[in-house]
Amino acid sequence: MEELVTGLGGLLSRGLLKDHATSYGALPQTKQGRAALAGILNHYVCARFPEYAKFHSGTGVIGVPGFWQEPSGMVHIWKPHNYLMPLLVVPYKDANGLIQACQIRLHANDILSDEKRYFWLSSTLERHGASSGTPIHFTFLQRELPPGETVLITEGALKADTVVRFRPNARVIATSGVPVPTMNSSQPQGHITR
């Protein structure tokens, strides 16, 4: 998983420092590796929050975006297929500094020409899965923002964190992305459907 940090297009190539890399996570490229990780995390959550697990058939991670459960009871995280490379996990923090959702960034080797690079760590299409929603990311604590302070808005948490790396006093909010309108072939060119 070192390639996510030091490899071509990795975190260090964006200008982030090694210390900053610990703010991000990674998921194994294989479904077996992710299932093993999901099992470890499920065990941890069940031990820490046994009352919550009781309401979900002894499974503590059900209801957490990205996790899902097979009919056999085995828990998983992310999609049920393999990738060529590990998956970068980019946290989206709320105004209090707590992680409220995560995005997955696929490696260039795992992207087809018509695919997106970023996806929400969400499992709405899987059994007992949950949505992450599409929250915004704060690089600062809202309670520490002085009145009248300038706030920059950008696309993507990774980009926002990179801005703060080079401008430590910047206050940046990031959206998850901007959808690109598509052309409707039944309309004349220049008319965009919304």
Image (cartoon, rainbow, N blue to C red):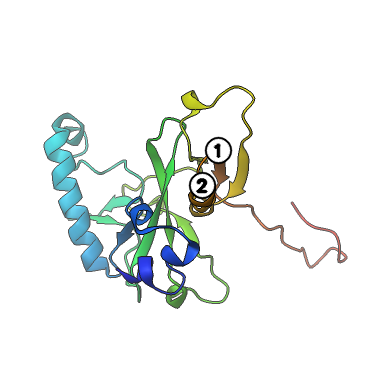
Instruction: Look at label 2 and name its amino acid.
Output: Val
Q: Position of residue 32 (x, y in %)?
A: 21, 67
Front position in the image: 30 or 174: 174
Q: Is residue 122 left or right of residue 190?
A: left
Q: Position of residue 68 (x, y in %)?
A: 29, 51
- SS for callout 1: loop
Residues packed near mark 2 inside 10 Å, few (<14), some (14 to 19) or many (20 plus)? some
Question: Relative to residue 116, is residue 74 depicted above or below?
Answer: above
Marking on residue 164:
2
**Quadrant of the image occupied by residue 184:** bottom right
**Quadrant of the image occupied by residue 51:** top left
Front position in the image: 8 or 19: 19
C-alpha distance separating marks 2 and 1: 7 Å
Question: Relative to residue 21, is residue 148 depicted above or below?
Answer: above
Residues packed near mark 1 inside 10 Å, few (<14), some (14 to 19) or many (20 plus)? many
Residue at point 80% right, 57% down? 192
Residue at point 18% right, 36% down? 53
Which residue in the structure is indicated by mark 1? 171
Front position in the image: 10 or 192: 10
Front position in the image: 104 or 142: 142
Residue at point 30% right, 50% down? 67
Q: Position of residue 41 (x, y in %)?
A: 19, 49
Q: Earlier in the sequence, mark 2 or mark 1?
A: 2
Instruction: Look at label 1 and name its amino acid.
Output: Arg
